[in-house]
Amino acid sequence: MNRKLRMLLAAGAVCTVAAGFGTVAQAEGSTFTYAISSDPGANTNPITSSDRFGLMTSNLVYSPLFKINGTECEWYLATGYELSNDDRTYTFTLRDDVTWSDGEQFNADDVIFTIEQIMDPDNASEMYGNFVTAEGPVEIEKVDDFTVSFTFPKASPAHLEAFAYEVYIIPEHKFADVEDYDTYAFSEPTVTTGAYIMTEYSAGSYLKFEKNENYFRQEPSIDTIVLRIITSNDTAMLAIQSGEVDAWPTTPAYLEQIDLEASNLTSYAFNQGRIGYMEVNTTKIPDVKVRQAIFYALNKDELATATYLSTDNYDNVYTFLPPNNGYYDDSESEKYETDVEKAKALLAEAGAEGLTVNIGYCSSDTTQETWAVLMQQQLAQAGITAELNPMESAAYYNELENPDKPFDLYFGGYIMGSDPQTYADLFKTGSTFNYTGNENAEIDRLFDEGIATFDTEERAVIYKELQKVIQDDAIFYPIASNSYIVLFNNRVQGIEECGLVPIYTLGDAAFLTLAE
């Protein structure tokens, strides 16, 4: 998953610019309206779409080969795969009964075309690294019209996930002449294999989708889906209470203000495998004892409950992996339970009494702001002075990529894949997204060993040690793994069958229904 999306999702940014509902021309038949907090824009292609609601659009319109649900593959355009004896070649068998919404046959050429667009460096796709690794690019072979193979230059148990996240297959016959995906804009109904066809886009107001009657999984029950852009949480809260919208992702603080029964609403919460965290800029704080002192001065429970209110809304987390990950194991990891005296002792050992740190955060993000203010108070108890450095959202996230950023401490987070290898770029020496600037040969070694074997028991031992080493290095302070909360009007049914999933929220909207 792309880094900017990881940061924004984990930050939990809250926009406060008010916006009216706008006017949506309603089609005849049933309509489901979902409130979204930002405009994904008119770029309706999954090659470059990367924000939450852009990906939500991709998930409504296009289909992947498969999705990973826990440890199981949920098959869509593919029906299965075979792995070669050397563990490098994945050969997928495709469905032969799928047509695009314009009547054209879906086949292997569409799959190959999509992956080639991702692998083209000029397209700057966020999935580029899925298929072009340090050892070289994947080799693609069309076996026949409904069979395609991908050979990676080096075996890795993480390669299967390369196809499962954000990789939605697009029609070659519609995109073959596109020269710049960044400027490709919606101009006519999308051609899709997904449950819905995007038919209208009104900037800053809404996106409208009509059902694809030929959707290969099942014909959608709801005729029209509208993603209504409402950038103000206060406005969206009124809209969900009045029935103006049918669904809205919200926060614990707003949830507490709503009488669910009176408003005919039900709250659904699910863990996205998301971690909100604080990181340390090791180029400015190179002494591990000082970093550990900072961690011992903090109170994780206070930070989590200040924003998520109750443990009903979050899970405690003590390593870089979310607690619902199959390899999560904190049994030997330092948990940094609050110990102010130990923090003071470590500062004295390091000769860092009277330490001053700069805390950077996104000024429009109420979660980060709350954490920054609380951390300032907590650190003060250990004699550490914290200076707050709020920045506008775009400037803040751009600054994180700057090796000379002014922050000593800063906030962010991520939703990653299920394989621990997907986290390697955040921690390995010299990796693109290692914003801490940390260099640790032991961390590098363990990540390399983790992808050198397909044996899950061996990997579990390796990742248990890796979680301990990263915690001991005190570069990453996990605060909480919070749930994503969505309010639904009670007229919306089939939510369990649809599935609520990370990022895209609606697993397969074809399974949603509306009560009379």
Image (cartoon, rainbow, N blue to C red):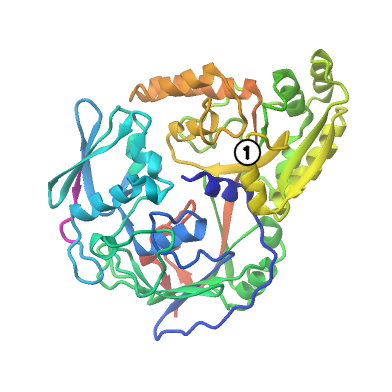
**Mark 1, residue position:** 402
Answer with left or right where residue 465 lies relative to residue 287: left
Let me know if residue 60 is in the magenta part: no
Near-viewer residue (253 or 104): 104
| Quadrant position of residue 233 | bottom right
- Residue 274 seen: no
Image height of 203 relative to 411, above or below: below
| Residue 451 in the image, given as x and y percentages of width and height | 38, 25
The segment highlighted magenta reads 91-97
Residue lying at 53% horizontally and 25% vertically, measured from the top left: 429
Dot 1: element:
loop
| Residue 4 in the image, given as x and y percentages of width and height | 54, 47
| Residue 129 in the image, given as x and y percentages of width and height | 40, 39
Residue lying at 47% horizontally and 54% vertically, measured from the top left: 50
Image height of 41 relative to 77, above or below: below
Near-viewer residue (455 or 421): 421
Which quadrant of the rendered structure holds the C terminus?
A: bottom left
Residue lying at 59% horizontally and 42% vertically, measured from the top left: 413
Answer with left or right where residue 187 lies relative to residue 428: left
| Residue 346 in the image, given as x and y percentages of width and height | 79, 17
Q: Residue furthest left?
A: 144
- Residue 311 seen: yes
